[in-house]
Image (cartoon, rainbow, N blue to C red):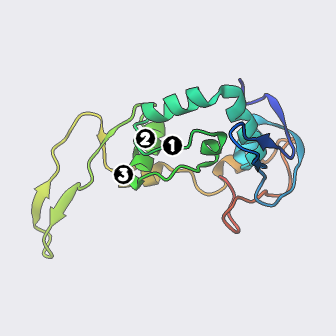
């Protein structure tokens, strides 16, 4: 797979082998754009392409990587996991996202970096552990909103209108 691979943003239908239920994943705005590269689809949160990609990669590999990122919560054993259907603990999300800023290594997390009195006296400082991170340290490493989109804005093949995520008035990047 490459970010330049093209998938079709289209309505999907998956039938359950266990019962007669049908799952129809769709994009937030219930509109479909047609052919897009994976880069565009993931940048603009195209759910139907994310599901197709998950289907192509395979659920066992996706769940294996989730475990490698130390996600310990129960994960749905279906393609909806690619859309974030798992109920994860906040620290699991911190560790998984921190791995992106930590060269792919899943870090240990210090939940309490330092404890001070109201006067500023330090009562406790967490010991330095090689490879450990404090979650707040990664806030300044996140791109500004629309940072990646701005980098690709001059490309003629990029959509001109911003596509929305499930959050009102928010883009995927």
Q: Which residue is mark 2?
A: 71
Neighbour tally class for label 2: few under 14, some 14-19, many 20 plus, Cα within 10 Å = many
In the displayed structure, does residue 40 sit left or right of residue 11?
Answer: left
Q: Is residue 151 visible?
A: no
Is the residue under label 2 in contact with that under label 1 (CB below 8 Å)? yes
How many angstroms separate mark 3 from mark 2 (CA)?
16 Å
In the displayed structure, does residue 130 sit left or right of residue 54?
Answer: left
In the displayed structure, does residue 59 sit left or right of residue 63?
Answer: right
- Residue visible at 78% across and 29% down? 4
Neighbour tally class for label 3: few under 14, some 14-19, many 20 plus, Cα within 10 Å = some
How many angstroms separate mark 1 from mark 2 (CA)?
9 Å
- Residue visible at 78% across and 56% down? 163
SS at mark 3 in the image = helix
Q: Which residue is mark 3?
A: 135
Q: Is residue 88 above or below residue 2?
A: below
Earlier along the polypeptide chain: callout 1 or callout 3? 1
Q: Position of residue 156 (x, y in %)?
A: 88, 42
Q: Position of residue 23 (x, y in %)?
A: 75, 48
Q: Which residue is mark 1?
A: 75
Considering every residue shown, the one lying at the far bottom of the view is 118
153 and 98: which is toward the camera: 98
- Residue visible at 19% across and 41% down? 128
Q: Mark 3, mark 2: which one is toward the viewer?
A: 2
111 and 20: which is toward the camera: 20
Q: Mark 1, mark 3: which one is toward the viewer?
A: 1
SS at mark 1 in the image = loop
């Amino acid at each position: 797979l490459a970010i330049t691979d093209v998938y079709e943003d289209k309505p999907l239908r998956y039938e359950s082998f266990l019962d007669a239920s049908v799952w129809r994943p769709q994009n937030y705005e219930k509109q479909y754009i047609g052919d897009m590269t994976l880069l565009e689809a993931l940048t603009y949160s195209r759910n139907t392409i994310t599901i197709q990609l998950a289907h192509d990669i395979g659920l066992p590999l996706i769940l294996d990587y989730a475990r490698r990122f130390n996600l310990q919560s129960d994960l749905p054993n279906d393609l909806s996991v690619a859309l974030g259907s798992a109920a994860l603990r906040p620290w699991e999300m911190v560790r998984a996202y921190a791995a992106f800023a930590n060269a792919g290594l899943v870090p240990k997390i210090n939940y309490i970096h330092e404890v001070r009195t109201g006067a500023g006296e330090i009562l406790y400082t967490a010991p330095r552990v090689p490879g450990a991170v404090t979650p707040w340290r990664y806030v300044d490493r996140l791109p500004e909103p629309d940072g990646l989109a701005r980098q690709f804005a001059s490309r003629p093949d990029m959509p001109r209108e911003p596509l929305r995520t499930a959050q009102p008035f928010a883009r995927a990047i």
